[in-house]
Amino acid sequence: MSKSLPDSIAWIAFAFIAMAAAAIWQVQQKAADLGARHDAPVKTRHSIRKSAAAWAADPNGDYLSRCQRGLTAREVGWIVADFKCAGLDHLPHNATPAGHLAQRWTQQRWYRGALADGLRLSSEQSNQVAAKLAKNFELAANRLNQRLDAESMTQLVTASDWLGDDGSDFQPWNLCALTPEQEKITQHTIRPNAGSYHLVTLSSPFVSSPPFHFQKADPPPQFRSASTVFPFTRHQVFLGQPNPLDTRTDRSAETLIAQVRCLHPAQLKMLLLLQPAMTEQIQQALEIVVPPSAR
């Protein structure tokens, strides 16, 4: 490898770190705009959207309410369109270190938006998350500089890798100081023994089991990654089907959309981030089930 290549990667990393610093400064200057809308994706073709709801005094109560309410088909379409508009539904077309770093930066912005939406982050918390994610991005860029190959670049932009088992630095409780109500949402104190499920006691609003028993969340297998940060609740009852991702028939498409509509918006954002292939499946199902005027 020529000497100029590592230097180029170092320069790319420096440029993105500078961008991160500039973004944090803008956050501090525009505290009134922080929160769920801070990292809103580029405007999609949908011209009419409801304004983001004001942050609730009780994030946990707000979370439970939104899980119970679910999503409209139009809201599902908006989130999917935003994800595609951000270019996150596929690997970078530009197979260069710069292209992959740009993709990772966009993924982290999407993740921060999901955290702000699901946890109703305050201005101070949003600042903390922005700063921590900028540092994590710098570390990822440095690792790429040390090992520049196709595998490393692919791992850099595979969210299921950097948010997986070794992604403790990206968990919300390690990115900012959560309030007790927000900790009720993440349930991170019981996660080490819960695996991909979330064990809850009878005193929790997430339970639906008999007294003194533990309840395992039971979503469709393909949806479990949606609860990586945001657990499912007893109000989210998913339809079952042998192959819910087979959208070749109207019935399977209807089932898939019914399942997606059970999600909290932040859960859907996490699902797309961790399983970007589902973006096209959900969009195809929407086209089968939902009339164009309702998308």
Image: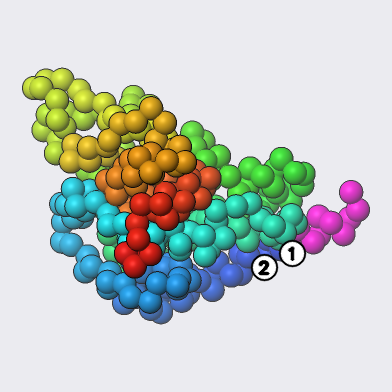
The local secondary structure at tag 2 comes to: helix
Residue 275 belongs to the span the image colors magenta:
no
The residues bearing labels 2 and 1 have C-alpha atoms spaced at a distance of: 6 Å
Report crowding for label 1: few under 14, some 14 to 19, many 20 or more residues within 10 A (C-alpha). some
- Up-down relation of residue 264 to residue 236 (above or below): below
Image x and y of residue 162, in percent: 54, 43
Q: Residue at x 67, y 68 (%)?
A: 15
Image x and y of residue 66, in percent: 21, 53
Residue 9 vs residue 176, the one in the foreground: 9
- Up-down relation of residue 141 to residue 229 (above or below): below
Q: Residue at x 63, y 42 (%)?
A: 155
Q: Quadrant of residue 22?
A: bottom right
Residue 197 in sight here = yes
Image x and y of residue 274, in percent: 48, 44
Q: Quadrant of residue 78?
A: bottom left
Residue projecting furthest to the top: 213
Which region shows up in magenta?
Answer: 1-11
Q: Residue at x 31, y 57 (%)?
A: 73
Figure quadrant of the C terminus: bottom left
Residue 7 belongs to the span the image colors magenta:
yes
Q: Are marks 2 and 1 in contact (CB under 8 Å)?
A: yes
Residue 66 vs residue 250, the one in the foreground: 250
> Which residue is labeled 1 in the image?
11
Q: Residue at x 52, y 60 (%)?
A: 84
The amino acid pointed to by label 2 is Ala
Q: What is the number of the mark on residue 32?
A: none
Left or right placement of residue 73 versus residue 23 in this view: left
Image x and y of residue 49, in percent: 31, 72
The local secondary structure at tag 1 comes to: helix
Residue projecting furthest to the right: 2
> Which residue is labeled 2 in the image?
15
